[in-house]
Amino acid sequence: MAEIEQRKSVRLNHQVPCSVGSRKQLEGGMVQNFSAEGMCIHTSLAPGVGETLNIMLVNGQGKKMTVQGTVARMTRVANKDIDSYKHSISLGLSLIEAPWEYFQLLGSFQDKTIEEPLHG
């Protein structure tokens, strides 16, 4: 039987447009959910697991911020709610570095939470 690992932090279900990539390639994307330790992004970018990416976000006051994360997982998705030919990759990112504004953004999403176990 597969062991179930509990997430260390609550995921906040909130969609936010973003740009994601490296210095060489930048693509549009949509953050699907956030946590203090990472995020899930749907994008057309297909990096390798372990690759470090920059994620550009804009908070509710219009301030731009850059978050850095490592690709923990990458899967193809088919989702009727998104433009599947543009955003057919789901990236699970573990945060490496985030400015204080990122955590303020998380605080503004506290009313929309989801909690799911990881399946190992």
Image: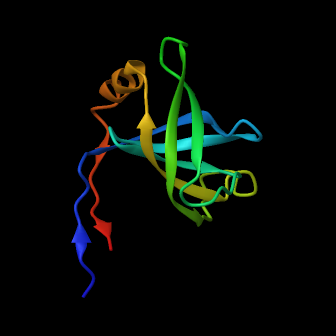
Q: Position of residue 89 (x, y in %)?
A: 63, 58
Relative height, residue 85 to residue 104 (above, below) = below
Q: Residue furthest bottom?
A: 1
Relative height, residue 107 to residue 29 (above, below) = above
Q: Residue at x 56, y 60 (%)?
A: 49
Q: Position of residue 113 (x, y in %)?
A: 29, 43
As rendered, which of 4 and 14 lies closer to the eye?
Answer: 4
Q: Number of marks in the image? A: 0
Considering the image in quadrants, where does the N terminus appear? Answer: bottom left
Side (left or right) of 34 relative to 27: left
Q: Residue at x 26, y 55 (%)?
A: 7
Q: Position of residue 117 (x, y in %)?
A: 27, 63
As rendered, which of 39 and 14 lies closer to the eye?
Answer: 39
Side (left or right) of 5 relative to 54: left
Q: Position of residue 53 (x, y in %)?
A: 59, 42
Considering the image in quadrants, where does the C terminus appear? Answer: bottom left
Relative height, residue 59 to residue 19 (above, below) = above
Q: Residue at x 50, y 42 (%)?
A: 69
Relative height, residue 56 to residue 13 (above, below) = above
Q: Residue at x 29, y 59 (%)?
A: 116
As rendered, which of 117 and 69 lies closer to the eye?
Answer: 69
Model colouring: rainbow
